[in-house]
Image: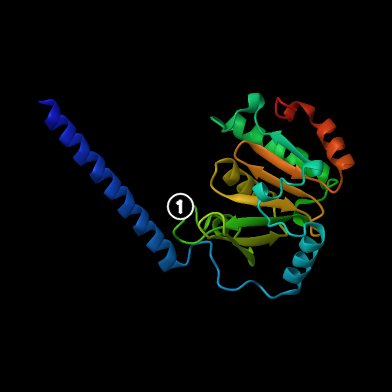
Amino acid sequence: MSRPLVRLLCTIWTEASIRWTSTLWYLRAFGRWATGSHGAFRHPAHTAEARELTAAWESTWPGSEPRGFLIREHRDRFVRFHSLPGSKRYADNAEECAEILRRHHAVITWISDDAPVEDLVVIAADWGPRDLVSGWSRRHLPAAWPWRQFRDADNDGIVTYFWVASRLSNSDLDAVLTAVADDKGSAIVTDTRASWLYCPYDGGADVVLPSALARDALRDQFPHWLPTAC
C-alpha cells in the first residue's frame, strides 16, 4: 500500500472518529437535557435552610465562591494533603481506594471535632447538560437542593450550579469522595456554619481553617500526608 493512500486512509479514519465522538457527545447532552438528569437549575431554593447557609457563607467567606480552586487565596489558613503515598494521584486497586477514603475521613474527623457525618454539609458543584459530568451530584446526592449559581466571566461564561446536601450517611459521603477522587465531580465538605472548608480533589484535599493556628495544628497532625515541598 502506497504512503499517500495510507495517509488518506488515516485522515479519513481520524475525521470519522472525531465526527462520531462529537455526535455521541451531542446525543448524550440531549439525553441529559430531555430527561432532566443534568446539574442545572432555574431557581435556587427559598427555604430557611438555604438562607441560613447563605448567611453563614457570606459571613465567613465574603467575596468567595464555593469552589476549591477559588478559595486558595486564603493562603494563611490553607493546607494541602495528598491522598495516596508518594503523591500518587489515582487508585489502581481496592487497597488504594480504601486508603483514599481513610485519609479523607481522618482529616474531616479531626477538623470537625469528631462530629457525626449527619451534621456535615456537602456543597456539590455541577453544570449544565452539555458538560460531560453534568448531573453527577444528583446521582450521588439525590436529596440535594439547589443553592446558588456562579457565572465565570473569565472562563467563557461557564455557569456552575451548587447543590447542597446535609444529614448524610457514611455511604453518601463516601460516594461523593470517591467520585471526586475519580475526577467525576467537585465538592466541598463543611459544617452548618461554613466555619471550615474541606475541598477534595483527584489526588488529595485542600483545607481552609478559621485561623493560621488551627491550620498549623492540622498540618502537624498529619505530616506524612503533606506534599513533599511542605
Query: Relative to 99, does residue 63 appear above or below in the rendering?
Result: below
Q: Is residue 117 above or below residue 79?
A: below
- Extreme residue in the right direction: 213
Q: Pick the quarter of the image with the C terminus.
A: top right
| Residue projecting furthest to the front | 154
Image location of residue 129, percent across then percent down: 46, 61
Residue at 83%, 40% in the rendered image: 215
| Residue 217, image quadrant | top right
Question: Residue 172: x percent and y percent?
Answer: 65, 52
Residue found 77% across the figure and 42% down from its top: 75
Residue that lies at the very extreme toward the left in this rendered image = 1
Report how many numbered discs are placed on residues in the image: 1
**What kind of element bears circle 1?**
loop
- Quadrant occupied by the N terminus: top left
Residue 155 occupies quadrant: bottom right
In the displayed structure image, the side of residue 101 where residue 7 appears, left or right: left
Tell me if 126 is positioned left or right of 196 in this view: left
Q: Is residue 126 left or right of residue 131?
A: right
Local packing at callout 1 (Cα closer than 10 Å; few below 14, some 14-19, many 20+) is some
Residue at 64% x, 27% y: name it: 87
- Residue 10 x/y as whole percent: 21, 35
The three-letter code of the residue at mark 1 reads Leu
Q: Is residue 214 above or below residue 63?
A: above
Is 112 situated above or below 121?
above
Q: Between 182 and 95, which is closer to the camera in this rendering?
A: 182
Please name the residue that numbered disc 1 is placed on: 132
Colouring chosen for the image of the structure: rainbow
From the viewer's perspective, tell me whether residue 72 is left or right of residue 97. Answer: right
